[in-house]
């Protein structure tokens, strides 16, 4: 059974429509249809920009900062796959575009490695691995 969120919990919008909604929000208000129920109708989230927005309960999900790492790994992996594919196409299309795309791919791989410890292999970036599986500092 899913427990409703309380004030101060952190959440994400399930289907973000603008850059603000991609950020982690804090629950600042919980709207119940009546005082005798535990069913939540709406949540109000405050985003890091200070903006507050109200969403139907089904439109948000509980999330934590710790969950951000998994989301970032997935996003970097998908980005690496897309840029790798573009690099392969650009190779036959235009030499300058090809070198620029390859440079972008290299920078993406380096950034993921440096900041997340995520090893993306441009030949097969769909299978990331980390050198530090326990999550501690090396």
Image (cartoon, helix red, strand yellow):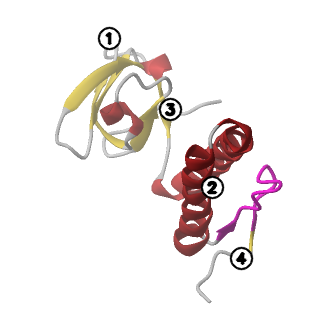
Q: Earlier in the sequence, mark 2 or mark 4?
A: 2
Q: Earlier in the sequence, mark 1 or mark 3?
A: 1
Q: Position of residue 7 (x, y in %)?
A: 31, 40
Q: CA distance from mark 2 to mark 1?
A: 58 Å
Q: Which residue is mark 3?
A: 61
* Left or right of residue 82: residue 43: left
Marks 3 and 4: CB-CB under 8 Å? no
Which residue lies most toward the front here? Answer: 95
Of residues 122 and 52, the one drawn nearer to the viewer in this rendering: 122
At numbered mark 1, what does the secondary structure look like: helix, strand or loop? Answer: loop
Q: Position of residue 11 (x, y in %)?
A: 43, 39
Which residue lies most toward the left here? Answer: 50
Q: What's drawn in magenta, residue-wise?
A: 118-129
Decide: is 116 above or below 73.
below
Decide: is 5 above or below 122.
above
Q: Earlier in the sequence, mark 3 or mark 4?
A: 3
Quarter of the figure with the N terminus:
top right
Q: Which residue is mark 1?
A: 34
Name the mark nearer the viewer: 3 or 4: 4
Q: Which residue is mark 2?
A: 102
Residue 38 is one of the magenta-drawn residues: no
Give the quadrant of residue 90: top right
Name the mark nearer the viewer: 4 or 1: 4
- Residue at screen point 62% across, 40% down: 94
Of residues 80 and 60, the one drawn nearer to the viewer in this rendering: 80
- Residue at screen point 56% across, 52% down: 72
Name the mark nearer the viewer: 2 or 4: 2
């Amino acid at each position: 059974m899913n427990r409703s969120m309380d004030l101060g919990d952190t959440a994400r919008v399930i289907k973000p429509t603008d850059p603000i909604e991609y950020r982690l929000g804090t629950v600042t208000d919980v709207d119940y249809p009546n005082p005798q129920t535990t069913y939540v109708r709406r949540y109000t989230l405050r985003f890091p920009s200070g903006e507050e927005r109200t969403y139907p309960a089904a439109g948000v999900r509980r999330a934590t900062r710790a969950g951000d790492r998994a989301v970032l790994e997935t996003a970097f992996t998908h980005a690496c796959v897309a840029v790798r594919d573009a690099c392969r196409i650009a190779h036959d299309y235009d030499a300058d575009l090809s070198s620029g795309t390859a440079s972008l791919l290299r920078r993406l791989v380096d950034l993921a490695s440096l900041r997340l410890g995520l090893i993306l292999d441009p030949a097969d970036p769909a299978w990331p691995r980390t050198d530090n599986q326990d999550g501690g500092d090396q």
